[in-house]
Amino acid sequence: MPRNLVAQTPTYPWEQLKPIRERAAQHPDGPVDLSIGSPVDPVPDLVQRALAEHADTPGYGTAAGSPALREAIAGWYGRRRGVELDTDAVMPTIGSKEFIAQLALWLGLGPDDVVVQPVVHYPTYAVGADATGARLVSSDDPDEWPAGTRLIWLNSPGNPDGRVNDVQLLRRAVGRARELDAIIVQDECYAELGWEAPWDAHVPCILEDAVTDGDLHNVLSMYSLSKQSNMAGYRTGIVAGDPKLVQSLVNLRKQFGLSLPRPIQAAMTAALDDDEHVQAQKTVYRRRRELLLPAARTWGLQISDSTAGLYLWGTRGEDGWDTMRALAELGVIGGPGHFYGSAGERYVRLALTATDAAIETAAARLSL
């Protein structure tokens, strides 16, 4: 019998923060919300202009993306990720979350199949496994991935922990995926945001020849413009890799009507063709990180990873909800590590995506 997803979908986890938010709101100077990684800075002018210039486009967008957009995606991978791709190996998505949540469904997975996700993980990797009834395994060690694995999710830089998968680990992961005949996808949405050497220069891409030996069969990379270009509201994601698999996904997405509007595709093209605004935004985030990181450590958070990405992932050696309540006493709202798997239950996540003023206020409160 088909699963009734409407009836079985659990309550959205972030609603559990209501009492934390209420307590933080009692601070005399108001709350500072560092719980959600939603951009607050302006959308770049060049993106806004491209959107406006293409507003009068009454036709449907294509699931494959316009030729200009596919060229821009391939060009970006060449410049920024060190990977040369043909345009039939790339496609746009309506943000990254819809692809993550639905891929297991599209692949036709079921109870006899296994989906692998990182030990500390973005919650949406589990959604497709749950919807299909596939068994979910949380493991960072390719040797542990069991027979029956059909889909493997990697995340680098990690959300929430900011960990980076190096080339050696990626080679092991791709090699094990080939042994299992599984599709392996690395979510690389924070790839432009490395902070500490060597990752400030380049975060490895799963599509690099050093990882795949030039064979992209069943290997995919994902990316998003939400953070690098403040385009979360535009819902602009990217999938690239195995050309045969990408084209099969394009065909399926045509059937489901999953195509970006043409003005959004034009805006996305403009963003991908320009690296200057990305570096400017990275400078903004670096400044916020340099304020918040030492303050969080002064307050007592142990932060060992977080070398890339948009979050500080730390622990005080106690249950994460206790840390959340302690932060709320300061009027600071974090993200509970419980949402990111059992390994995160003693952690909290602090986002760098608040305004300069909010980060300065949070840093001052944590430093007292």
Image (tube, helix red, strand yellow):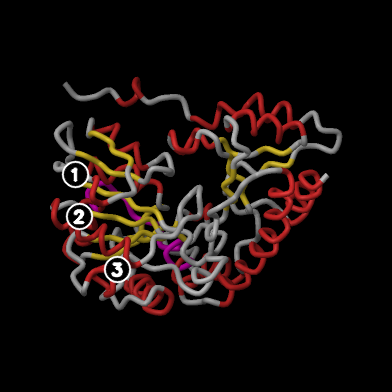
Residue shown at the point (42%, 64%) measured from the top left: 265
- Measured as percent of width and height from the top left, residue 110 is found at 17, 34
Residue 349's place in the image compared with 157, above or below, is above
Residue situated in front as seen by the camera: 304 or 116: 304
Whole-percent x, y for residue 362 in the image: 75, 46
Could you tell me which secondary element the residue under label 3 belongs to? loop
Q: Most prominent secondary structure in the magenta stretch?
A: helix
Distance from disc 2 to disc 1, alpha carbons, whole Å, reads 8 Å
**Position in image of residue 339 (x %, y %):** 49, 35
Q: Which quadrant holds the N terminus?
A: top left
> In this picture, which residue range is highlighted in magenta?
254-267
120 sits to left or right of 248 = right
First of labels 3, 1 by sequence position: 1
Q: Is residue 93 located in the magenta-colored stretch of the structure? A: no
In the rendered image, the vertical position of residue 192 relative to residue 289, given as above or below: below
Instruction: Name the kind of residue labelled 3 in the image.
Output: Leu
Residue 58 appears in the rendering: no
- In the rendered structure, which amino acid carries the disc numbered 1? Thr
Left or right relative to 236: residue 317: right
Is the Cβ of the residue at disc 3 closer than 8 Å to that at disc 1?
no
Where residue 330 sits, quadrant-wise, is top right
Mark identifier at residue 177: 2
Which residue does the numbered mark 1 point to in the structure image? 149
What crowding class fits label 1: few (fewer than 14 Cα within 10 Å), some (14-19), or many (20 or more)? Answer: many
Q: Are the residues flagged by discs 2 and 1 in contact, CB closer than 8 Å?
A: yes
Residue at left 18%, top 70%? 215
Using residue 238 as the reference point, say whether residue 337 is left or right of it.
right
Q: Secondary structure at mark 2?
A: helix
